Image (cartoon, grey):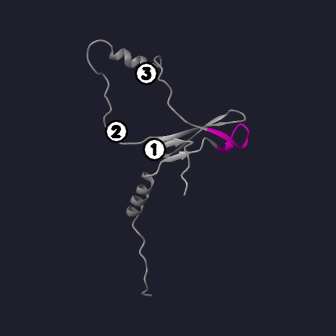
Amino acid sequence: MTGNISRPRSLKSLSSDLSLSVLGKQVNVPKTKKAFCKGCKKHMTMKVTQYKTGKASLFAQGKRRYDRKQSGYGGQTKPVFHKKAKTTKKIVLRMQCTDCKQTCMKPIKRCKHFEIGGDLKKK
């Protein structure tokens, strides 16, 4: 058996090809989506929005402790983080049932460009 046997490509080359194809695309999610609702116990249409972090409370225990320590003379008291490694954040979709208003969060993969309800590309 000395025929033309194609060697499998290495994992490294496959992963680099995959990342290149994914990087160029913009993630586009529809405004409504059918998904399982825990409240209704069946698949329902959900309204999709992007999750955003809420405003930090000034009266949380950690913030009060930090402000107390920072007050007065003496400069910065806690270490400031500088070793940032990631360039993107994971996108979290907040899905709300149109019937019972129950919400659930669904994280999707990392991406640089994200859009909800953008116009679809025509082939």
Residue 62 tag number: 3
For discs 3 and 2, the disc positioned in front in the rendered view: 2
Amino acid type assigned to the residue bearing label 1 in the image: His
Secondary structure category for the residue under label 1: loop
Name the mark nearer the viewer: 2 or 1: 1
The quarter of the picture where residue 84 lies is top left
Q: Secondary structure at mark 2?
A: loop
**Above or below for 48 versus 19:** above
Tell me the SS state at disc 3: helix
In the rendered image, residue 72, in percent from the top left (x then y), is placed at 30, 12
Q: Magenta region, mostly helix, strand or loop?
A: strand
Q: CA distance from mark 3 to mark 2?
A: 22 Å
Q: Nearer the viewer, residue 32 or 97?
A: 32
Residue at 33% in and 32% down: 81
Q: Where is mark 1, residue-wise?
A: 113
Rendered image: mark on residue 84: 2
Of the image marks 3 and 2, the number of the one nearer the N terminus? 3
Q: Considering depth in this image, is 18 or 60 the residue closer to the camera?
A: 18
Residues drawn in magenta: 33-47
Task: Work out whether residue 72 or residue 101 is closer to the camera in this orientation and state it.
Answer: 101
